[in-house]
Image (tube, rainbow, N blue to C red):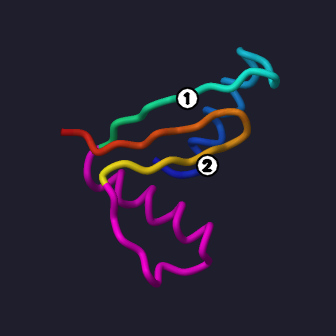
Amino acid sequence: MKLEDLYKLSKECVGIIGDKTTADMTIYLNEAKHENLQQEAYRLHNKTLQGYKSKNTFEVIIGNVKFIIKLKK
């Protein structure tokens, strides 16, 4: 999964629920996908991976949708 995929999900959600409503979506990913997405989000926000530390749960907000990304157990 990539940030682009979350963007597409966000656009679909806003199309269904409207742009005045907010939504929280929890996504459980396997370790590899979770790590790759977390690094991509960190790199986009900080322009580097310097200082990066992996977390079991992290959040990405795109539009009116907050994605809560958790590690699948």
Give coordinates of residue 50: x percent, y percent.
46, 84
Classed neighbour count for the residue bearing mark 1: other residues with Cα under 10 Å, few (<14), some (14–19), many (≥20):
few
Residue shown at the point (66%, 24%) measured from the top left: 13
Q: Is residue 73 left or right of residue 19?
A: left
Q: Is residue 57 above or below residue 22?
A: below
Residue placed under numbered mark 2 in the picture: 4
- Residue type at tag 2: Glu
> Which badge, 2 or 1, is on the more N-terminal residue?
2
Q: Position of residue 67 (x, y in %)?
A: 53, 38
Q: Amino acid at mark 1?
A: Asp
Looking at the rendered structure, the secondary structure element under dot 2 is helix
Quadrant in the picture for residue 69: top left
Mark 2 neighbour density, 10 Å: few (under 14) some (14–19) many (20 or more): few
Our reading of the magenta stretch's main secondary structure is helix
Can you say which quadrant of the picture contains the C terminus? top left
**Residue range of the region highlighted in magenta in the rendering:** 30-55
> Residue 2 location, x and y as percent?
51, 51
User: How many numbered marks are there?
Assistant: 2
Query: How far apart, in angstroms, are the residues tagged by discs 2 and 1?
Result: 18 Å
Report the residue marked by disc 1.
24
At mark 1, the secondary structure is strand
